[in-house]
Amino acid sequence: MTRMLLLILTLWALSPVACVAGENGSPSPDPATGIEGTISAGPTHGGPVRKGASSTMPLAKVNFEVKQGEKVIASFATDSEGRFKVLLPPGQYTVVRSGNRTAIGQYGPFEITVSAGKMSTVRWECDTGLR
């Protein structure tokens, strides 16, 4: 009996029917499908920008949500360099900052179309509202 159960479980695990589903019950996205890139913010201080000085900085350790309509499909956080990568099924999405929103500045929304089998690379800039 134990050998038979082991054989059945092994065959099931190797079958194409055994697919991994995401949180919402839909199939997990292809590992090569989604969005990746960097998010920066600027200006970093009020007043004029000095010649040769950067007026933006990486938007580090900030949480974002990926939505379709009002439904949150995924979430991610930028790393210390403002980089991120999120796997998604093909479709149209809106990316917005999640959690506490500040009274000034604009951190999205960013519109993106994800194509099958492709990582869309983006470089988004947020406005801190400093002048």
Image (tube, rainbow, N blue to C red):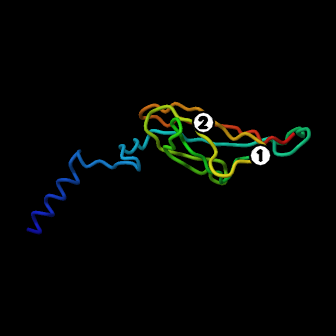
Which residue: 67% across, 50% down? 81
Q: Quadrant of residue 117?
A: top left
Residue 32: give x, y in percent of width and height.
44, 40
Q: Residue furthest front?
A: 70
Instruction: Say which of 89 and 38 sits in front.
Output: 89
- Please name which of the two marks, 2 or 1, marks the residue nearer to the observer: 1
Estimate the spatial distance between the alpha carbons at disc 2 and disc 1, rounded to whole Å. 26 Å
Q: Which mark is residue 47?
A: none
Relative to 82, is 67 on the left or the right?
left
Please state if 44 lies on the left or on the right of 81 as rendered.
right
Q: Evaluate if marks 2 and 1 touch, with contact meaning CB atoms under 8 Å apart.
A: no
Query: Dot 1: few (<14), some (14–19), or many (≥20) neighbours within 10 Å?
Result: few
| Residue 122 circle label | 2
Q: Is residue 88 left or right of residue 122?
A: left
At mark 1, the secondary structure is: loop
Q: Please provide percent x and percent y for residue 34.
A: 49, 39
Figure quadrant of the C terminus: top right
Q: Who is closer to the viewer here, 10 or 99?
A: 99
Look at 51% across and 36% down and name the residue there: 68
Q: Is residue 21 left or right of residue 77?
A: left
Residue occupying the point 10% across, 66% down: 3
Q: How many marks?
A: 2
Query: As displayed, is residue 18 above or below residue 92?
Result: below
The numbered mark at residue 103 is 1
Q: Secondary structure at mark 2?
A: strand
On the rendered image, what quadrant is the N terminus found in?
Answer: bottom left
Residue found at x 91% / y 38%: 48
Q: Residue 99 location, x and y as percent?
A: 64, 51
Q: Position of residue 113 (x, y in %)?
A: 52, 30
Identity of the amino acid at label 2? Answer: Val
